[in-house]
């Protein structure tokens, strides 16, 4: 395909998202890639992008770009794009990447192809494949305006290839708007998650409503309310799931039923109204496999399900299924993985 492919490098305080390198590698298969790195350690990120397959890079590290904010970042992308006319701009499908693609598309009077899992070079245009109807169908879409802006589903494009011997030009550019013209200010950051984040995780261990179903667990005497007893039981289940996740260096996910019932916070929810994930391994424990849950994890490479009900729909999606009680199976899995992985 003629023309340049640009790739936005998403990072937090200079720490790049692995999905950024997936996007660079995906772009490099289509043509010459120019990476865009803004903010803290932007020059180092630009150089790293070249190692992952970019031919060159623009970087900007003005004080106003130190923290991610949509307005200065999108305005710089659109200013550069108007000057250099790339064919397409790829963004990792992170929250920041999606926000930025939408804002830049408005500035550039172009369109966004979101949640892309495959890109096809069709000569004149790029065609993007994306899941629709909760992943039941795939649609092939093209963007009739230029540049086409695409957000790439995290972990859908395979492992990026790194070559630290690669070299390319990095060009420093200036912010497009002054601080006084930026409406938002970052007041503070709060860490809410100590563990591996769901979006980037190679392995996810998820629990559902089934975690509350262990009549052998007796809640402490001070818990008298039936709902609180249910939550307490489920939390013991999630502790057990956390141990398995720890052994596998995995993130902990949950179904919406588990989140709505108050077993775990919303940030763990996988599915149509939660996070969409594509890990190498997804272990579903006490999850029935409702279509809205499948929408968030059906592109996982290997799905393993543990469920008491042999007819649970999750088994239709699973490579490996265990019909049994998660309270028996999970400790056995944790023990076996500990031995195998020498942990
Ligand atoms: C608009 C909309 C959006 C939605 N978005 C989402 C979403 O983003 N994510 C999501 O997950 N859901 C979502 N849902 C809800 C979805 O429809 C289901 O209600 C939900 O996924 C069910 O969660 P679950 O599988 O944990 O619970 P259940 O369907 O109740 O299944 C529990 C399973 O646990 C098994 N079980 C019970 N005890 C044990 C045991 N001891 N050991 C092993 N197995 C056991 C049971 O056999 C059962 O299969 C959405 C619904 C709507 C309408």
Image (cartoon, rainbow, N blue to C red):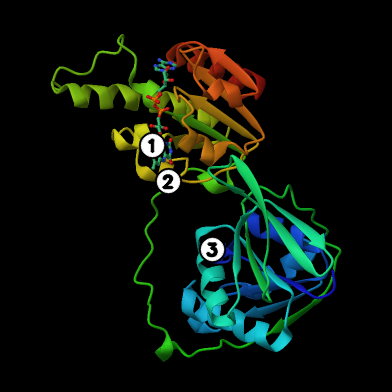
For ligand 1, tell me if the residue under mark 2 lies within 8 Å.
yes
- Give the Cα separation between the discs numbered 1 and 2: 8 Å
Does dot 2 land on a helix, a strand or a loop? Answer: loop
Q: Quadrant of the N terminus?
A: bottom right
Locate residue 220 relative to residue 89 in the image: left or right: left
Say the numbered circle drawn on residue 98: 3
Q: At which x and y percent is residue 292?
A: 46, 38
**Where 332 sits versus 68, above or below?**
above
- Residue 39 visible, this angle: no
Q: Which residue is mark 1?
A: 256
Q: At which x and y percent is residue 173?
A: 65, 86
For ligand 1, tell me if the residue under mark 1 lies within 8 Å.
yes
Does dot 1 land on a helix, a strand or a loop? Answer: helix
Locate residue 213 relative to residue 205 in the image: left or right: left
**Where 169 sits versus 289, above or below?**
below
- Residue 190 visible, this angle: yes
Q: Quadrant of residue 220?
A: top left
Image mark count: 3
Locate residue 279 relative to residue 30 in the image: left or right: left
- Give the Cα separation between the discs numbered 3 and 2: 16 Å
Does dot 3 land on a helix, a strand or a loop? Answer: helix
Q: Quadrant of residue 301?
A: top right
Say few, some or many: other residues with alpha carbon within 10 Å of mark 2 (under 14 / 14 to 19 / 20 or more). Answer: few
Of mark 1 and mark 3, the one earlier in the sequence is 3
Q: Which residue is mark 2?
A: 273
Locate residue 175 relative to residue 117 in the image: left or right: left
Q: What residue is at 51 percent from the left and 27 percent from the top?
A: 284
Q: What residue is at 64 percent from the left and 64 percent from the top?
A: 150
**Where 167 sits versus 332, above or below?**
below
Answer whether labels 1 and 2 touch (C-beta < 8 Å). yes
Say few, some or many: other residues with alpha carbon within 10 Å of mark 1 (under 14 / 14 to 19 / 20 or more). Answer: many
Of mark 3 and mark 2, the one earlier in the sequence is 3
């Amino acid at each position: 395909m003629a023309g340049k492919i640009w790739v936005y490098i998403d990072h937090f305080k200079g720490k790049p998202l692995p999905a950024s390198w997936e996007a660079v590698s995906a772009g490099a298969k289509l043509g010459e890639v120019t990476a865009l790195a803004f903010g803290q350690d932007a020059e180092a990120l630009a150089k790293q992008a070249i190692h992952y397959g970019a031919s060159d890079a623009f970087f900007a590290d003005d004080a106003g770009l130190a923290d991610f904010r949509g307005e200065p970042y999108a305005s710089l992308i659109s200013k550069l794009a108007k000057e250099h006319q790339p064919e397409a701009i790829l963004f990792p499908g992170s929250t920041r990447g999606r926000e930025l693609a939408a804002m830049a598309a408005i500035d550039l009077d172009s369109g966004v192809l979101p949640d892309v899992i495959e890109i096809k070079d069709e000569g004149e245009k790029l065609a993007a494949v994306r899941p629709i109807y909760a992943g039941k169908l795939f649609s092939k879409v093209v963007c009739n305006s230029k540049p086409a802006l695409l957000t790439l589903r995290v972990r859908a494009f395979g492992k990026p290839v790194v070559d630290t011997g690669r070299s390319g030009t990095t060009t420093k550019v200036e912010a497009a708007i002054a601080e006084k013209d930026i409406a938002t200010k970052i007041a503070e950051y709060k860490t809410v998650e100590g563990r591996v984040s769901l979006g980037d995780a190679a392995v996810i261990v998820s629990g559902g409503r089934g975690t509350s179903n262990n009549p052998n667990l007796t809640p402490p005497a001070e818990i008298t309310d039936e709902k609180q007893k249910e939550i307490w039981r489920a939390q013991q289940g999630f502790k057990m799931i956390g141990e398995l996740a720890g052994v596998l260096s995995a993130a902990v996910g949950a179904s919406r039923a588990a989140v709505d019932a108050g077993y775990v916070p919303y940030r763990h929810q996988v599915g149509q109204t939660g996070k969409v994930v594509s890990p190498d391994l997804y272990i579903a424990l006490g999850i029935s496999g409702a279509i809205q849950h499948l929408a968030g994890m059906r592109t996982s490479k290997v799905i393993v399900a543990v469920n008491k009900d042999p007819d649970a729909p999750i088994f239709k999606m699973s490579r490996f299924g265990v019909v049994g009680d998660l309270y028996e199976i999970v400790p056995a899995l944790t023990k076996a993985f500990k031995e195998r992985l020498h942990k």
